[in-house]
Image: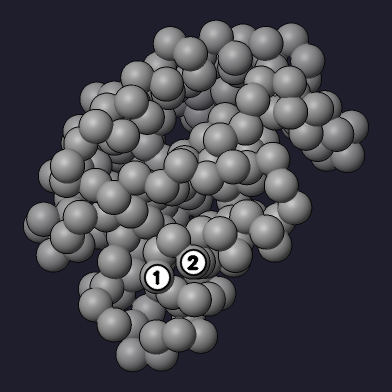
Amino acid sequence: MTPQAFIFMGRYGAGKGTQALLLEALLARLDSSHSVFRLETGAEFRKLIEGTGYTARLAKKVVDSGELTPAFMPIYIWGKLFFERYDGGHAIFDGTPRKLDEAKVLGSLFPFYGLEKPWLIYLDVDHEESKRRLTIRHAEHGRKDDHPDAVERRKAAYAADIEPTIAWYRDNPGYRFLDIDGERPIQDIHADIVKRLGLA
């Protein structure tokens, strides 16, 4: 199986991390000859803001507010991790990119590593469903960026920054765009993704 790249996008709480993990496990079972590198930018950001440095403090303020960080930050994080850990296998991007300028920089990575025509897996969930899921997550885990006020700011950030990025991918012949209904049971969504990727 030729190594492939998969990008998961969608609203906050759309289930990107869950579906990325399921795909990672499937690829590991189907293709033992290649590794699977899953990059979860959100987890790396949370590690960053746990620090005490000046950049960490500024980033924490942005994340807690529900706003998107400047594009240079995620680019630095995923670029560094890719340099250090990617070894030529499959690559899964969970929650990266968000802004359009970041997407264009990420696009320069794929031809360099021979990852032709990446898959863009868009989990389509409306705002009210996203809000419901984040409210549950906030109650269970207490993350400040899931607070109701932050969720409303996330809605505005999604419309301003992420929707144009999704539209750019949808119309880009260099990517294979999958529009996935994300408001179904987890296993139904996974089965749909697997079928449409041709991995069933």
Picture residue at 25% right of the left edge, 59% below the top:
83
Q: Is residue 25 above or below residue 167?
A: below
* Image quadrant where residue 99 sits: top left
| Near-viewer residue (130 or 95) | 130
Q: Is residue 84 above or below residue 152?
A: below
Picture residue at 37% right of the left edge, 29% below the top:
166
Q: Which mark is residue 38?
A: none
Type of amino acid at the residue the image marks with label 2: Lys
Tell me: 175 left or right of 7. left
Residue 124: percent from left, percent from top: 56, 35
Tell me: 191 left or right of 186. left
Residue 137: percent from left, percent from top: 81, 36
Picture residue at 10% right of the left edge, 57% below the top:
112
The residue wearing badge 2 is 195
The residue wearing badge 1 is 198
Tell me: 2 left or right of 187. left
Type of amino acid at the residue the image marks with label 1: Gly
Q: Secondary structure at mark 1?
A: loop
Q: Residues within 10 Å of mark 1 (few under 14, many from 20)?
A: few
Q: How many marks?
A: 2
Q: Is residue 121 above or below residue 9?
A: below
In this orientation, does residue 41 appear?
A: no
Tags 1 and 2 touching, CB below 8 Å: yes
Residue lying furthest right in this view? 139
**In this figure, which colouring scheme has been used for the structure?**
one colour
Q: Residues within 10 Å of mark 2 (few under 14, many from 20)?
A: few
